[in-house]
Image: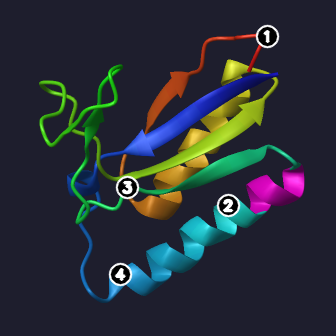
Amino acid sequence: MTKYLISFPSEAMVLTDEEFPMVFAESHAVIEEAKAAGVYVFGGGIAEEVAPLLVSADGSVSAEIYPRSELKGGFTVLELPTREDAVEWARKIAVACRCPQELREFGYDPAS
């Protein structure tokens, strides 16, 4: 089976204070559904208040990251039999989160 990344940048989720509890509950319900279906790998949100670091091959650490590599928002990784299944789960998450989701497929690596 293939692993898929379903994600959105934090600025895509525009909610009122009244909407947030409902979106929180609905998005967690989709995650519980994915867990019950046995397709959930992991997920969460990037801690945007914690600055990223670049760790080089020589072990040095820098606050400078790759240009245009900004990563923020929420993500879910699911393991699914088909891309069509991945699209359906991305749709469920989009409905629950009230924002479009990006869908990416992980390349297969037999050693991982």
Residue that appears at 61% across and 70% down: 28
Quarter containing the N terminus: top right
Distance, label 4 to label 3, CA atoms, is 21 Å
The total of numbered circles placed on residues is 4
Residue that appears at 14% across and 27% down: 68
State which mark lies toward you, 2 or 4: 2
Question: Disc 4, disc 3: CB below 8 Å?
Answer: no
Distance, label 2 to label 4, CA atoms, is 18 Å
Image coordinates for residue 74, horizontal then vertical, percent: 42, 53
The residue labelled by disc 3 is: 46
Q: Earlier in the sequence, mark 2 or mark 4?
A: 4
Distance, label 1 to label 4, CA atoms, is 42 Å
* Secondary structure that dominates the magenta span: helix
Image coordinates for residue 82, horizontal then vertical, percent: 76, 20
State which mark lies toward you, 2 or 1: 1
Label of residue 31 in the image: 2
What's the amino acid at mark 1? Pro
Question: Disc 3, disc 2: CB below 8 Å?
Answer: no
What's the amino acid at mark 3? Ile
Above or below, 70 against 42 in this view is: above
The residue labelled by disc 4 is: 19
In the image, taking residue 4 as reference, residue 38 lies left or right, namely right
Image coordinates for residue 7, horizontal then vertical, percent: 44, 42
Front-most of residues 4 and 53: 53
Which residues make up the magenta segment? 33-37
10 Å neighbourhood of mark 1: few (<14), some, or many (≥20)?
A: few
Front-most of residues 58 and 90: 58
Question: Disc 1, disc 4: CB below 8 Å?
Answer: no
Q: Earlier in the sequence, mark 2 or mark 1?
A: 2
Residue that appears at 77% across and 60% down: 33
The residue labelled by disc 1 is: 110
Q: Earlier in the sequence, mark 3 or mark 2?
A: 2
